[in-house]
Image (cartoon, rainbow, N blue to C red):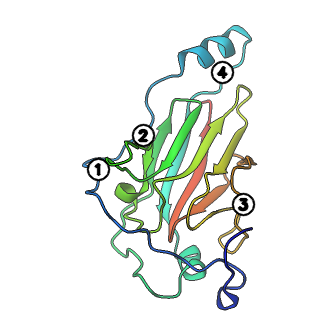
Amino acid sequence: MNKDQDNNLGGRPKLTVVPDLEPESESPVASTAVDSDTDESAATNGQRHLPVRLHISVDREFFSYATSGEIDFPEDFEGPIEVVVTDSDCLIGRRSDKRSVEPDIDLAVLTADPAVSIEHARIHVGPNNEITITDLGSTNGTVVGVPAGPDIDSNTKVPLAEGSSAYLGAWSKVTVDGVGW
């Protein structure tokens, strides 16, 4: 891990609030276009990896671990929010008109998380329903499994099994709820 460590957070890097330099998206964005090349080749081999159902929510335990009280937890969050991913790759982050980035899952809209990077992480679904998450060098990292776990290494695919969760930003939680149903 190449981030400065803060001993008061049990080894977790100190949270950095990512400045909101651009207006939020008007509505949640989820990947809806089927990747026809991947889908056709998988169907030809009798394998089909799409769709994947994710639940997007906020997590107080992760928030308590990831922050030092510099921002407030979103008490009014109504969720979880179900997102169906129908593409083999799904970008998680927040929209940036300046950088021409429109993530498939916009956590600035869905969870109002100020600590999510523009290109925070990517979920990949392989032809045999294997799901991985990759942190894309985000400012605040990505944790898989338990809220108090270590950040995953940037640019390294980490398996996400059905029922498991990834934690991003200050309080966002992405849970794999269903695969290829």
- Assign a secondary structure to mark 4: loop
Earlier sequence position, callout 4 versus callout 1: 1
Which of pointers 4 and 1 indicates the residue nearer the eye?
1
The residue carrying pointer 4 sits among few (fewer than 14), some (14 to 19) or many (20 or more) residues within 10 Å by Cα, namely some
Furthest residue in direction top, as rendered: 44
Residue pointed to by mark 2: 30
Residue 74: x and y, percent? 38, 74
Earlier sequence position, callout 4 versus callout 3: 4
- Closer to us: 12 or 167: 12
Q: Amino acid at mark 2?
A: Ala
Residue in the image at 48% along x and 38% along y: 84
| Residue 25: numbered disc | 1
Residue pointed to by mark 3: 152
Does residue 14 sit above or below 118 in this rendering? below
Choose top left, top right, bottom left or bottom right for residue 12.
Answer: bottom right
Q: Amino acid at mark 3?
A: Ile
The residue carrying pointer 3 sits among few (fewer than 14), some (14 to 19) or many (20 or more) residues within 10 Å by Cα, namely some
- Assign a secondary structure to mark 2: loop
Residue in the image at 47% along x and 68% along y: 115
Q: Pointers 4 and 3 in contact (CB under 8 A)?
A: no
Does residue 90 sit above or below 32 in this rendering? below
> Label 1, label 2: how many angstroms apart (C-alpha)?
12 Å
Q: Amino acid at mark 1?
A: Ser
| Residue 69: numbered disc | none
> Label 4, label 2: how many angstroms apart (C-alpha)?
20 Å
Choose top left, top right, bottom left or bottom right for residue 148.
Answer: bottom right
Residue in the image at 45% along x and 54% along y: 118
Which quadrant would the N terminus be assigned to in this image? bottom right
Q: Pointers 4 and 1 in contact (CB under 8 A)?
A: no
Earlier sequence position, callout 4 versus callout 2: 2
